Every structure is written in structure tokens, then in C-alpha cells.
Amino acid sequence: MSRKVMFTHPMIESGLAEMQALGYDVFCPKQKMSRQEILDMCSPYEAIVCPNFKVDKEVIDRMPELKIICAFGAGYDNIDVAYATEKGIVVANMTAVHEVTAEFGISLIAATMRNIARLNYELRTVPGLPWGPIANLGHSMRGKTLGIIGMGRIGRGVAKRALAFGMKIIYNNRRSVGEELEGFLGGARLVSLEELLRTSDAVFINAPLTPETFHMISDKELEMMKPDAYIFNQGRGKIIDEEALIRCLKSGKLAGAGLDVFETEPNINPELLKFPNVVVTAHMGTSTYEDKAGMVAAAGENIIEYFEHKRFPHIVNPQVLAKLGL
């Protein structure tokens, strides 16, 4: 039987090869579709791959044949996992995205602290921009303390790369990563969130969005930070209270920020765009040609493993297996 698989967004189609070779009926749009367009056509599909698309009760109820939902990355807060589980639908994610995301994370830190992004813009747009030994200064990364909130694979990858820049690592996480890995990361230390905020020169967020992490960085937390510190968010936009961040930036409390995710993305609060010391990017931690094709193939692997072998290498809701008699 030809399995019907739906991608909600355009993809690099070379990644579809394995599913197509198995005869799967794969729909991959050529251009971005509206939510209503997706709702109107999703009914017959058995699998859906959903980058930046909310698969909630409305979508799930429109798809009576749905067997598996595949997140397009490690995060899956755009999927109603509880309702999918109730309906006996497997939810899977991808774990092989940490290296490329960590690569982008350290690039965002460097581009912000060393004024690379700002100067690239100003040299193109500001006539007579001054040059000279004390013009256009940024901050060295060498010798600075990087505080990482969320020490999963991506956080550890950022820490590893930060060591090459001579940074010291502290982190806040639900649990320690262990003495051996802490030693490998230059003597990284697990600290409280308050200690991390008070002592870090740069705070890097890569935690998942949960009820506990929603607006975990707001006025109180920003006030704890050093006046010449930077904050970076590559986790989820709603972890930072953006209105609080804007107030902090207006007061000159922070040296700057680098943001790859936003509270209402793809819409960005226009106030954030007014600050020359804020670098903004378009949720692009995995945005390379090589890795996007690989992610499409990884989504296909999740789907193939389920349909062909009843295996679930990256299942998010293992409790659903009892419902499926597996």
C-alpha cells in the first residue's frame, strides 16, 4: 500500500529519495501554504512533517488516517502531544541537529560580541562611518564567562566551541552533565539560574519551551545581569519576555543581544529592530543546504521505521505504544 506523507512546507527534495523509492505518495509544496490550505487538503494523509506549523486538535481531527507526526527538529512545542497520544498517534522528533545548531549558536555569539553583524550593516548604510583604533569596538570573547541555560546536546556543542574562543563555561540545567563531561568542557560548573545570570558575561539560552521555562527571563532576571553582559536566545522565543528585554535595552542595561527566535515569529516586535546592538536572525540554527536535506531524510527515516518495521527510534510519546498494542 502506498503510504501518504505530507510536508507542510517546501523542502530540499533530494531528502525525499528514500520514501519515494519505497513508493510512498509524498506531498511537498513548491511554495509556502496557508494554514487553511493545509487544513483543506490534509485529510487523507497518514504522516505529517510540520516545521513551523501548529499541529493541534483542529489539524489532528481533520486527519482520520494520521499515524505519525514528525517534528522538523529537536523541538516539538508546535505539536499537541497529549491529544496525539490520546488518539493513538506517534509523535517523533530529530536528534541529529545539534552540531549544526551549535555551530550557528557560537556564530551568533561572535557576530554580536565582536560587532560583526552591526558593522556589516553600518558600513553599507552610514556614510562616513568612522574608522580608527578606538572606533567600532566590540567585546572579546576570550576570558569571558559564558552561561548556558539548557545543557542538552546543543548546549554542550556550543560550550565545546566556546572553549576554542577561550571562554569559561557555567551552566544551568535540570541535572548535572557529569564530572567527566564537565572536565572535557574545561571545568564547566552547574550553577543556579541566579548565579549564572549574575556572573556571566554572555548568557546563551537553548532550553525547550515548557510551562516552567515560559518567560523564565523577565525583568527580575534581566536586572540580575551585569551591565555589560550579552544575552542570546536560540531556544524558543517565549522563554524571554520580550517587553522586559526591550525595557532593559532601552535603559542601556545590557551590552547587546543576539536573537534567533521570537515570541510571535515570524513577526518580530519592531522595537527590537531599532537597537543597533541587537542581532536578529530568522530561526535558522539548522539552515544549511546540507543539513536541511539531511533533516528531510531524517523525517523520512522516522516515518519509514514506523510503517515498515514498527520501530520508533526518536519517539516523543512512548506511552502511546501501549495504545497501539506495541
Image (spheres, rainbow, N blue to C red):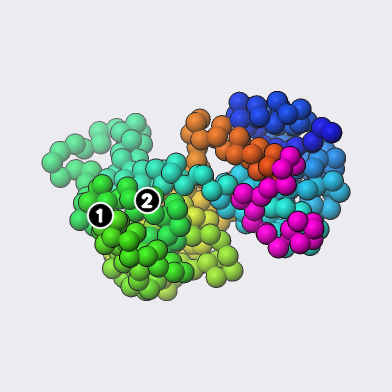
Specify the segment rendered in magenta: 307-326
Please give the name of the residue rendered at 36% of the width and 43% of the height, measured from the top-left corner.
107
Residue at the image position 35 percent from the left and 71 percent from the top: 191
Residue placed most toward the observer, 230 or 141? 141
Disc 2 element: helix
Which x, y percent locates residue 189? 31, 67
User: Which quadrant: the C terminus?
Assistant: bottom right
Residue 299 appears in the figure: yes
Specify the amino acid type for callout 1.
Answer: Met
Along the viewing direction, whichever of 78 and 308 lies nearer the viewer = 308
Label 1 packing within 10 angstroms: few (<14), some (14-19), many (20+): many
Q: In the shown orientation, is residue 211 left or right of residue 123?
A: right
**Residue 158 numbered mark, or none:** 2
Q: Is residue 281 magenta?
A: no
Quarter of the figure with residue 304: top right
Please state which amino acid type lies under the numbered disc 2.
Val
Q: Residue at x 75, y 37 (%)?
A: 5
Residue at horizontal 70%, vertical 25%?
Answer: 21
- Placement of 152 over or under 50, stated as above or below: below
Residue 61: percent from left, percent from top: 84, 53
Mark carried by residue 167: 1
Quadrant in the picture for residue 26: top right
